[in-house]
Image: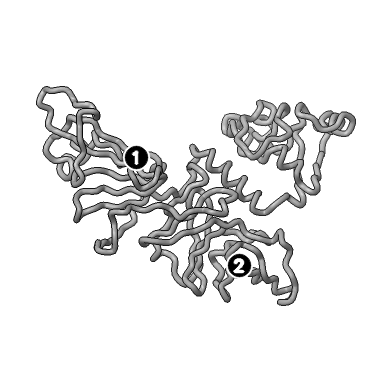
Amino acid sequence: MIPNQWYVVLESKEVGKKPVGVTRLGEKLVFWRDSNQQVHCAFDRCPHRGVQLSVGVVHQDHLQCPFHGFEYDASGQCVLIPAEGRTSQPPAAMRLFTYPTHEAHGFIWIWWGQNPPADLAHPPFFDNLDESFYYGSSIDPWEAHYSRVVENQLDVAHLPFVHYNTIGRGNRTLVDGPIVTWCENGSKMMCTYVFNRVDDGTPPRPASQLTPQPDQVHLELIMPNLWQNHISEEVRVLAAFVPVDATGDDEAAAVEGHERALSGLGRIDLQLLGIGRNGHIAFNEPGSSLGSRTRVKTLTQDTIIANSRFFGGDETKVPKTALTVGVGTVLEAREVVIIVSGYNKARALEKVVEEGVYPSV
């Protein structure tokens, strides 16, 4: 997933009076409405004890945790800890990581990123759609990364094969062009004009020899995940390709999500870690940068052997990579406690105590 973008994530009708918990872009999120029907979004996890906030309620426009009644406002700030009394001031660090939201045209967007600009503009929409259209909607889950789904919907060459008896009728296998342009609706909207025809033995014509017509069938994509098939002036197909899970192959999304979670909570108060016999902390192997952040690391053979005890002693079952917090994040914590136990870690402990912290330890 590409950060710092507006993503359509829900239909408006999916968020009602109660909080709604969903997985989007590989993250557990909660959505709720205030008394003005404004939609808000945050991580679906209370920072106090990790409870799922979507199981709670909306109380006086605040999202209330179902465990201890902590209440959070639209900015994510905790504004009430009932056990401390209504006149108490909750710590500033007690807050949720939130995303900016926008609701229009029956959709809900979130701006998926960190540090949104103060002048954040609303997401663009198709300027050739208005309230005169009647529509129905349905949800169709695909077992594919959303970028593959977008790619599929812009692929005009597959139509006569996959959709030979519907939209690909006519055996129009030869593709002239197509013409792909960035449209007038901002730099994020791309138009693909379709020129499929029956193969008559002549070579495909290049895009430079083609002229699109205003009423011609074409595809419109507003980056990153909103698509329209402009069939005619009266008929359209509109789709939002909503990223749900961050699959095992989408390591970048997992890394990005972890960093956003940490930045939303501020510095770590207490970082409690063990140490490997080769000196690694978390899964930061010797040689890791002292400024490193959350990332995927390839494990050394020593670490694989040490972790095989969790897999019945079978080294072949131990993952070869791991998602780890970075050394830089650890060093930013207000307090770091390293627990060292066992003779085989004595040398690593000696190096830290006698020689200090440096990349090779």
**Residue 87, above or below 25:** below
Sequence-first disc among 2 and 1: 2
- Position of residue 263 in the picture relative to residue 202 (left or right): right
Q: Quadrant of residue 350?
A: top right
Residue farthest to the right? Answer: 354
Give the colour scheme of this rendering. one colour
Identify which amino acid the numbered label 2 is placed on: Asp
Q: Residue at position x 30%, y 52% from top?
A: 238
Quadrant in which the C terminus appears = top right
Residue 38, image x and y in percent? 48, 67
Q: Quadrant of residue 274?
A: top right
**Residue 283, above or below 269:** above
Q: Residue at position x 52%, y 46% from top?
A: 4
Identify which amino acid the numbered label 1 is placed on: Trp
Residue 190, image x and y in percent? 34, 41
Q: Residue at position x 13%, y 23% from top?
A: 202
User: Which residue lies under the disc numbered 1?
Assistant: 182
User: Which residue lies under the disc numbered 2?
Assistant: 73
| Crowd tier of the residue under label 2, counting other residues whose Cα lies within 10 Å: few below 14, some 14–19, many 20 or above | many
| Crowd tier of the residue under label 1, counting other residues whose Cα lies within 10 Å: few below 14, some 14–19, many 20 or above | some
- Position of residue 109 in the picture relative to residue 62 (left or right): left
Q: Nearer the viewer, mark 2 or mark 1?
A: 1
Q: Residue at position x 49%, y 58% from top?
A: 101
Residue 211, image x and y in percent? 20, 35
Query: 166 or 349, which is in the foreground?
Result: 166
Q: What secondary structure is found at the residue carrying circle 2?
A: loop
Query: 345 or 117, which is in the foreground?
Result: 117
Residue 308, image x and y in percent? 64, 34
